[in-house]
Image: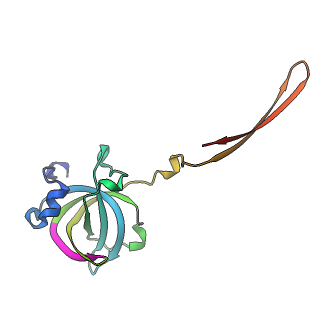
Amino acid sequence: MEQLVDRTVSFRDLLASPESYKGRLLVFGGEALNAKRLRDSTQIELLQLPLEHGEEPSHDRQQSQGRFLALRQESLDPATVVAGTRMTIVGEVSGAKIDRIDDVVYRYPTLIVKHLHVWPDQSYSRRERGPSVGVFGGIGIGGGTRGGGGFGLGF
């Protein structure tokens, strides 16, 4: 699909005029905000995030330029699309959908999903900030018996 993707269209371009890009195949990344089942597809609302190396969406939500909807033709249980999941989507622009974000009318660019990649949550491999506690001890022999122990506190 790589050869078919139009990389000249930015998310800002799509947001300004979704109808102008109807039928084009684009790639965008984002963080799932919610999902709902429609009659013949599943709609995933994403907060757009810039793509970094390897087409992985950024972790910095402050870099978002808006929201978009990804329509997956197959029916998924919305409970399987966990809020906060980062995704990269290759999709065909189908236009826009008007909806509300709280009390504000919002025009969502819509993409029909051709390929969807879910990025694993890597929080398990990152050290969380904050205090950590460690206990250690040891025994040494030489000239007499010596024992030792200690307590460590790290930040």
Location of residue 110 by image quarter: bottom left
- Residue 154's x, y, as percent? 63, 41
Q: Is residue 43 above or below residue 120?
A: below
Query: Residue at coordinates 25% horizontally, 58% vertically from top-left?
Result: 65
Image quarter of the C terminus: top right
Range covered by the magenta-colored residues: 94-101
Tell me which colouring the rendered structure shows: rainbow
Location of residue 104 by image quarter: bottom left
Q: Is residue 98 above or below residue 143?
A: below
Extreme residue toward the right, this view: 144
Query: Residue at coordinates 31% horizontally, 76% vertically from top-left?
Result: 102
In the rendered structure, does residue 99 fall within the stretch colored magenta?
yes
Q: Is residue 144 above or below residue 18?
A: above
How many marks can you see? 0
Give 76 or 63, whichever is nearer the viewer. Answer: 63
- Residue 19's x, y, as percent? 10, 67
Query: Residue at coordinates 13% horizontally, 50% vertically from top-left?
Result: 8
Q: Is residue 26 left or right of residue 64?
A: left
Extreme residue toward the top, this view: 143
Extreme residue toward the left, this view: 20
Give 61 or 22, whichever is nearer the viewer. Answer: 61
Query: Residue at coordinates 31% horizontally, 43% vertically from top-left?
Result: 53
Q: Is residue 111 left or right of residue 150?
A: left
Q: Main secondary structure of the magenta part?
A: strand
- Residue 41's x, y, as percent? 27, 74
Location of residue 11 by image quarter: bottom left
Give 145 or 116, whichever is nearer the viewer. Answer: 145
In the rendered structure, does residue 18 fall within the stretch colored magenta?
no
- Residue 94's x, y, as percent? 15, 68
Q: Is residue 56 above or below residue 84?
A: above
